[in-house]
Image: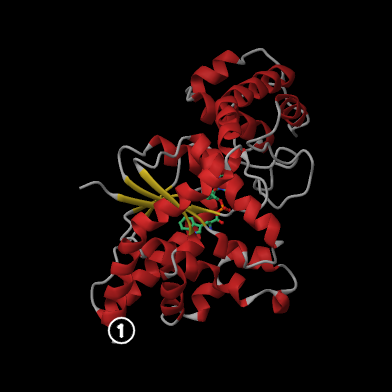
Amino acid sequence: MKKRVFSGIQPTGNIHIGNYLGAIKQWVASQTEYDNIFCIVDLHAITVAQDPQQLRAGIRKLAGLLFAAGINLNQSALFVQSHIAAHSELAWILNCVTPMGWLERMTQFKEKAGQDRERASVGLFDYPALMAADILLYDTHLVPVGDDQKQHLELTRDVAQRFNRQYGDTFVVPKPIIPKIAARVMGLDDPAKKMSKSEAGKFHAVYLLDEPGVILKKVKRAATDSLRDIRFDESRPGVFNLLSIYQAFTGESQAAIEAKFAGKGYGDLKKELAEVIIEGLRPIQERYAQFAADPAQLDALLAQSAAKIRPLAADVLQRVQTRLGLG
Ligand code: TYM
């Protein structure tokens, strides 16, 4: 029996190379090894206000990108979270076994709510319980994510274990898979900040659909330092970030990369890196154009995939309801 993999991604903002290297690339690479379920998490997106038309367009665009990146429905499911009602139903149940204190410790909530906590939605606070529901609903063993989701995964494990203790063995307790390279891609304009969809800076992130000229411009503008040698040195976050992106796209070893750039300058590194990103994204961009040309087909693929896995979710939800004495 193959292990079950579940992971999700929000259909908001522009998908960037952080999302690609931290998550999507691993999803595609391990498709044959696991039994995979990937989810476009629109219910998570609405924890902050969204423009309805943009959200709808964002879901299709993300679906197109994921298929273009290589998600294959013969090996994986790819569906929209709100199409399977059991996600919301299980989230409510998990709300009732998750202590407020656990959610209060979540750093992502603190960052996203910022100073104005009183105005943040209850949904934003409760975001990790919905994420736990996503994962636990499919008896998931493994969750491939970037480093920023680690704390949410720990909470998911804690919630599963607590439920199992209180009501008897019900949930599989999942484990994260975090890539060794590029688990936390940093902003090109500011290597102290994680590359993020919501950052407004023009030179912050490389998006999957950026044209070659734009990619070159962004990489050329990337922050480095006043030293010269090109080495993987975490105390020099700008250069380290560029080298890590290079490594993640090429699969070359650190030693080979350092040897390649020995005696060269940052200008050379940036030119070569831009080239590697452009070539890495080119096939995705070409395939994306085909998917984007037929939105009705995209909708049909997402609907078919949801229909296929809905019974899995229903089974687990039923198991949980029985344990609790519901209905
Ligand atoms: P989201 O949409 O913010 O990001 C999707 C995936 O991309 C990874 N990622 C990064 N990896 C490396 N460097 C970065 N700068 C970077 N930015 C983002 C994220 O770690 C993630 O793997 N809460 C999740 C979505 C979610 C989910 C789930 C994930 C909902 N339910 C169940 C796993 C399982 C999120 O907002 O991801």
Q: Is residue 245 left or right of residue 39?
A: right
Task: State which quadrant residue 98 falls in.
Answer: bottom left
Q: Is residue 22 left or right of residue 121?
A: left
- Seen in the picture, residue 58 relative to 151 is either above or below; the reply is above
Task: State which quadrant residue 74 falls in.
Answer: top left
Give the SS element for disc 1.
helix
Horizontal and vertical percent position of residue 119 = 72, 77
Q: Tell me the residue that label 1 is attached to.
A: 324
Q: Is residue 225 left or right of residue 159?
A: right
Regarding residue 155, the answer to whether it shows in the image is no
- Seen in the picture, residue 59 relative to 86 is either above or below; the reply is above
Of the pair 232 and 105, the residue shown nearer to us: 105
Q: Residue at x 54, y 28 (%)?
A: 249
Amino acid of disc 1: Leu
Q: Quadrant of the C terminus?
A: bottom left
Horizontal and vertical percent position of residue 131 = 48, 64
Query: How does the figure colour the protein chain or chains?
Result: secondary structure
Of the pair 303 and 23, the residue shown nearer to us: 303
